Structure formats: C-alpha cells, structure tokens
Image (spheres, grey):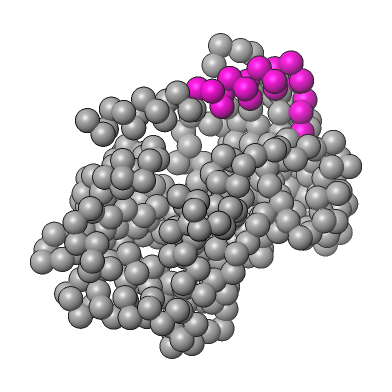
Amino acid sequence: MSELITEKTLAEYEAFVQSSPKGNFAQSHLWAKQKPMWQWKAIGVRGDDGQLRGTLALLIRQVPGLPYTLMYGCRGPVCDPADQATIRELLQGAKLLAKECRAYVLKLDPDIPSSNTQFRDFMLGQGFRLKEGGKNFEAIQPRYVFRLDVEGKTEDELMAGFHQKWRYNIRLAQRKGVEVRICGKEMVPDFARLMLETGVRDGFVTRQPEYFANMLDNLGEHCRLYMAFYEGEPIAGTLAIHYGDKVWYLYGASSNEHRNLMPNYLLQWRMIQWAVETGCRVYDFRGISGDLSEDNPLYGLYKFKKGFGGEFTEFVGEMDLVLNRPVYFAVEHGTNLLKEVRKRAYLRKNRK
C-alpha cells in the first residue's frame, strides 16, 4: 500500500533517499525548489516494520494550452531494483496520482544500468515503453555517463588510477598558478558568462545566471560553485552537487583563453576530493555520448572524462507509461520540434 509523502513525513523521506544506494538529488525535495514551475509530489511504500522501503518523487507540469499534465519521476524510483513488489506498489500510487492530475504520461529514467534486463523486462511488463533515442543527449537526462568508484579509496590511490597525462595536467595547472576556490553567489555572473562562452563554442543552450544562483540557495550545503582563477581572473568553473553517497559534476564552463593552463583538470580533481572527504561511494562525471567513435564531435568529452579512470555506464533509458495516446503523440512530437527550433535560434543569436 502506497502513501503520499506529507510535511509530517518529509524529513523521514529525505533521510531514506539520502541513505539509499539508488538515492539521487533529483529525487530530493530540495531539487523541487529548483523547479518552481512544477508541482512536486512523492509516494512512499513501507515494509512490515513500518519503515520506508521505496519512494518515488514526481514533478508535475501543466501542458500549455491543454487540460493535461506531464508527470516525471527523474531518476526514480528509489528502492532495491529487484524488489518488484515495492516497485509495483509505487507505480500503483503514481497511477492514482496521475488520474487526479490528468497526466497523459508517467515518465521515468531510472538509475539502473542497461545490463539489468530483469528490471527492464519487469517495467515493460507493467506497460512502460522504452523511448527510442540517439546516443548523444536527446533524452531529458543523459543515458550514458562516466562514474568513478571512490568508496574507501585515498586521494593517492585515485590519482594513481588517472591516465599519466591527466596527472601531469593537474600538476601543470597548479605549477602555472591556477587557483581553485569554492565561491558563493557573488561569482555567479562570471560563471554564467563562462557558460555562455562555452555553450556558443560547443553548440549547446545554457541557463540564465538566476538559475545557478537559485541552485546555490535551494541546495545549500549540498551544492558548490568551484571557480578557477589565473592572476585573479576567473577562467573556468563548475557546479557540483553532493547528496547521499554521490557527488555529481553538473555544469562546467571555461574561457576560450588560458585553456593551455588546464584549469578543467584541476577543477575535476577538486570535486573528486570533495567526494572523498564526504565518504562518497561514487563520483559521477555525468553525460557523455554513447557513440564512442573518434569522428563523433562529442568524442573529446568522452576522452576527457575517461582519462580520470571512471567506468562507462549506460542506464536503462527513458521509460514512458502512456496514459493518453493522442495527447502523448501530439505533445512529444511537438516538443521535439520546438526544442530544435529554440536551440538554433539561441545559437544564432549568441554567435553574433
């Protein structure tokens, strides 16, 4: 039997998500504050001992111009992936909520590796369909990531696992006088400027400065803005999140100048050190392309993250439980077209 998480049980919910190996910052109520245009609801299932044994947080948003909503459980559910009884109860609770909210789809992208065919087949048996997509960044969350196992390892042991050239670049940045600092909101304008510079250079849409400032407020001690300086000038930066047993590298930016000083290598090392200091199990480099051919424009990103000795990880992918087929078809196809139009317009504007 599932239950809705209330203000009374919210602290218990947060403690459970943080303690679970499948916990994710996107399943936290803190992350809901970062998405004010979405309504946040969470479902819990208890065991015979009365303790939570599974949860699923859902973001719900009205479809513009239509009396329907999109229901999205980013990186959920949070439970033992082999516990099919709990997952079934969580999904039943989500379906009841979907009926109340007139959701046309329940969308999930679980933190489950693609090798777990038992989980995939179970979800398909529950009516979900695996959403087809390419091998780059077509989904809401990246399907392919690099993850570094940091559990129980010292900094020296981790450094020894890096490619020799990566160790050299970290030390080069330090020798050349690159300094990395943990900064507050006062540096957000500089970080956002570097993000824009990076987005135009690499061809992706970036966020407004307010988004990054709000993240520091909403996640508090769970979020850090790292900035790299050379002779007092900010030349690169990253945003990282620590939640539960993981640290995620969420955003990264660098200037077109001073790239020869290798600030990005030193920034990664500082974030990995945060994961070690907080006793984490995983440092997550986040998205890469699933197309590992050297002629892929995204191959450089893969090569950069691979050099830190992590493991290429493919998740099971985006899963949709379609609740209203006509609306699903209309919204999904319209959304993809709109995204592409907006991206092209954005890049044209900022390249001028």
Tell which of 208 and 158 is nearer to you. Answer: 158
On screen, residue 337 above or below 38: above
Task: Report the number of numbered marks.
Answer: 0
Where residue 37 appears, as percent x and y from the top left, is 48, 29
Tell which of 194 and 221 is nearer to you. Answer: 194
Q: Residue at x 70, y 17 (%)?
A: 327
On screen, residue 342 above or below 55: above
Tell which of 333 and 157 is nearer to you. Answer: 333
Where residue 176 appears, as percent x and y from the top left, is 18, 76
- 241 sits left or right of 229 in the view: right
Residue 74 magenta-drawn? no
Where residue 237 appears, as percent x and y from the top left, is 29, 57
Task: Work out which quarter of the rendered image holds the C terminus and state it.
Answer: top left
Which range is magenta?
A: 321-338
Tell which of 54 and 81 is nearer to you. Answer: 81
- 84 sits left or right of 173 in the view: right
Q: Residue at x 35, y 29 (%)?
A: 346
State whether residue 25 appears in this view: no
> Magenta region's main secondary structure?
helix
Residue 322 magenta-drawn? yes
Q: Residue at x 68, y 42 (%)?
A: 318
Where residue 7 appears, as percent x and y from the top left, is 59, 43
Q: Residue at x 82, y 45 (%)?
A: 123
